[in-house]
Image (tube, rainbow, N blue to C red):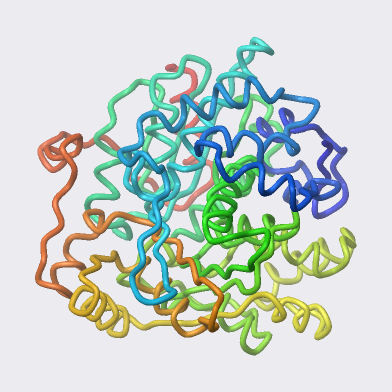
Amino acid sequence: MRYRSTRGDARPRDFSDILLAGLAEDGGLYMPESWPQFTPDQWRELRTLPYPDLAARVIAPFAEGSIDLSTLTRLCREAYAGFSHPAIAPLCEVEDGLFAMELFHGPTLAFKDMAMQLLGRLFEHVLSERNQSVTIVGATSGDTGSAAIEAFRGRDRLSVAILHPKGRTSDVQRRQMTTVTNDNILNIALEGTFDDCQDMVKAMFADQPFRDEIHLSAVNSINWARIAAQIPYYVRAALTFGAPDRPVSFAVPTGNFGNVLAAWAASRMGLPVKKLCVGSNRNDILTRFLLSNDMSMRAVEPSLSPSMDIQVSSNFERLLFELLDRDSAACARTMTEFRQTGRMDVPHKAWVHAGETFSGKTLSDEETRIEMARLYRESGYLADPHSAIGLAAGRQYQEQGVPMIVAATAHPAKFPDAVVAATGHHPALPPHLADLHERPERFDVLPNDLATVEAAVRKHVRRG
C-alpha cells in the first residue's frame, strides 16, 4: 500500500514511512492511494475473531508491504491486553435501537487509547527495525495528550512533547498528562486555544531544518496510522449487528473529524454504513458545514465538552480531498484560501455529496446538561458531556430497523464536575487513577510563539 498527500507535492510513501512522518512535507495529509475492499464473505469471517485479531486483519491492507499480519496481530494483542473490559469496546443499549459503543476502557479512559496503545507499539517496532529515534510532537484538546503520553512513556527511541491549551482542559485531563514524570515526556501548557496548539505543531513541521534536526513525527489524527487503528471498532460494532447483511448508522461527537472519518473509511472498504451523524458543541463549524455549507471559522469558545472546542478540523481535509475527486491541486488551493480568509468554499456538488452520508447536530452547554440528566434519569446511563452530545445526535437521526451506534468517547470520571452538576452522581476514578489529584504535576507554561516552543522542544530532546 502506498500513500499520497492531499496536496500533491510530497512523494508517495509506504505505511512505515507515513507512520514516522505524520504530516506530509507539503503540509498535506497522507491518504491511501486506493481503498482496500472486503467482500461480504471476508466481513463475515471476522465476526468470530477476538478484537485484537480482528483489528490486525482490518489494518493489514493499510500496512501491506511494511508490516506483516503476524507482527500486526502480536502488536494488537499486546496493545489491548491492558484494557479493563474483555470486549475492549463493549456495546450498551441505552434506548430501543440506540447503542453506546464504549471506547473508554483503556488506561486513560478515552477513545484515544484505542489507537494510541497500538501506535506506541507500531512506532517501537519500526524504529527498532531501522535503528532510529524520533521526536513526537502533538497537540491535544484534552484526551490525545494523555493517551499519547501513556502509550509512549519510557520508550527509549521516542522523545515526546505534548501541547495543551492552558486552562482549557478538565482537571482530570490535565493531570493525566502533567503527573507523568518519565524523562522522555515534555508537557507544554500553551497560552491559547487548541487551534493555536494545532497550528503550532503544523508550524514546527513546516520548519524543515527544525523538523530534520530533531526527527519530528506526529501522533495527532493527522497521522494516518491513527485513523487506520480506529477503523476496527466500527467494523466490530457493525458485524455485531449483522453486517454485511444489514446496514448500521453511527453517531460520533467530534471536533477534529478523525474519529468519524474512521467510520467513513470503514464504509469505503465495503462496510454497509447508512448514516454518519456528527455531534458538535457551540464550536459547531462541522455541523454548520453539513447543514448549510457554511465552513467559516469563528473564535473558539470554551464549553462543557472541551475536547471538541475546535474550529479548524484537520481531518476534514481528507474528506475534502475525496469530495474533490482526489484533485490535490484543488484541495491545496481550497485549504490555503481557508487559512487565509477563514472561509472554505466547497463546491455545491461536493457539499450535496457529503450530505448523502453525513448529518450534524449542535448542542449548547445547557442542552448537553439536559441530555446528560435525561439519560441518567430515564435509562440509568451515566454519560460524559461528549458522549451525551453523540447520543442526542444519534437519537435525532435514528431510522426504524437500522441500529444507531454512538461512540461513547470518554469515561464520565474524566469530567466529574459536569456529570455531578447534571446528574447529582459523582463518578469515581478507577483504582489505577484513584490518587491522581495527589500526584505532583510537571509542565511548562509557554507563550504562543514558535521560536520559544521550538527552543523548549529542542532542549528537551538534547537533554534526553
Above/below status of 257 relative to 44: below
Image coordinates for residue 180, horizontal then vertical, percent: 28, 31
Tell me: 453 left or right of 201: left
Residue closer to the observer: 355 or 236: 236
Tell me: 273 left or right of 180: right
The residue at the point 46 percent across, 24 percent down is: 78
Above/below status of 86 relative to 378: above
For residue 269, say whether it is visible: yes
Quadrant containing the C terminus is: top left
Image coordinates for residue 61, horizontal then vertical, percent: 75, 37
Q: Residue farthest to the bottom?
A: 292
The residue at the point 26 percent across, 34 percent down is: 442
For residue 202, say whether it is visible: no
Tell me: 85 left or right of 406: left
Quadrant containing the N terminus is: top right
Image coordinates for residue 82, horizontal then vertical, percent: 35, 30
Residue closer to the observer: 340 or 114: 114
Image coordinates for residue 456, horizontal then vertical, percent: 44, 33
Above/below status of 167 relative to 418: above
